Image (cartoon, grey):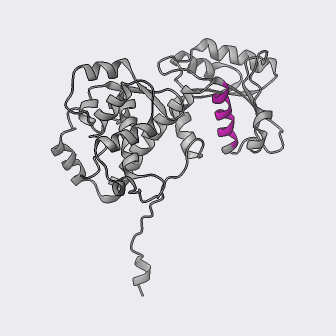
Amino acid sequence: MPIPDFQTLMLPVLREAQKGEVRIGDVVERLAEEFQITPEERAQLLPSGRQTAFSNRVHWAKSFLSKAGLVEPTRRAHFRITNRGDQVLSSAPERIDNRFLSQFAEFRAFREGQETAESNSAAAVAVEADSLTPDEVMRKAARELEAALAGELLQKVIAGTPAFFESVVVRLLIAMGYGGSVSDLDKALVGKSGDGGVDGVIDQDPLGLDRIYVQAKRYADGNNVGAGAIRDFFGSLDRFKASKGLFVTTSTFSSSARETAELLSKRIVLIDGSQLARLMIRHGVGCRVEETLTIKKLDEEFFDE
């Protein structure tokens, strides 16, 4: 039988997660047996040559279930079902697909309104596809892939330890051109008991003429950083006689926190989870290039002779 598409795999993946914490690689193997995928089909690679097509579709099924809050990551390459996921299975759905997941606000937000309940029918999708040029279709797909990757990056960071998050932030700053190299990571990380509320100190320029003090708060989504945390960080900067600081969180900042940062006498830049994920993607921190597609166009000058 042909390799099932990733939406067909959503319900089987959720059923596997109901067994307890599962490893994604084991789920791939069990579903390959369940769907009687032949050895030849199992070996079928993506154009990049780095992952099999079937494994890729299982991973995407798990990713979309996660965006809808039906499963959650536990540790590296492992995940489990959530209470919402249990409730969905108790309703005995015949199929779980994008249209089914659109009932959940988190999933609709993830898709950025592109596949809401009103426009998720096959006819509506066909009309939308017909209205786009080929390059627009590719760019739209690229945006969806990046949105999915951003969500996965944040989930990984939140699932890690506070120390790991601090190292991620410093690695990102180094990748952006601040400080020196990754070998300077230990020197830049200062977060520990008695650190004065500062998690990292990194040179703003290669000579170290100026420094940036960093505060990193690993909060779950919905647990916003308030104005009090910004004022505390301001006090820490005062103790270090620092003129500028960077406050990074995996969640978001309240409006009062942003207003406080604007009004204080020291320059404090705020980076929330969404911006953090975008910067990680842009600078290749925690992700890598899977495949490069080259788009060529007619060279008019070549024929204008």
Residue 242: x %, y % from top left: 79, 25
Q: Quadrant of residue 21?
A: top left
- Magenta-colored stretch includes residue 165: yes
Task: Write down the region rendered in magenta.
Answer: 163-174
Determine the residue positioned at 44% across, 79% down.
Answer: 301
Closer-to-camera residue (140/301) = 140
Q: Main secondary structure of the magenta part?
A: helix
| Residue 59 drawn in magenta | no
Say which residue appears at 37% left-offset and 39% top-offset. Answer: 30
Give coordinates of residue 214: x percent, y percent.
70, 27
Q: Is residue 304 left or right of residue 200?
A: left
Question: Front-most of 39 and 183?
Answer: 39
Where's residue 164, x and y in %?
65, 29
Q: Residue furthest top?
A: 228
Q: Give the total number of marks visible in the rendering.
A: 0
Q: Position of residue 247 (x, y in %)?
A: 64, 26
Residue at point 54%, 43% (across, down): 281
Left or right: where 181 falls relative to 280:
right
In the image, residue 300 sits, relative to residue 201, either above or below, namely below
Q: Residue furthest bottom?
A: 305
Q: Is 86 placed above or below 298 here? A: above
* In the foreground, 190 or 266: 190
Q: Is residue 225 left or right of residue 106?
A: right
Which quadrant would the C terminus be assigned to in this image? bottom left
Q: Image point 48% across, 35% down: which residue?
A: 152
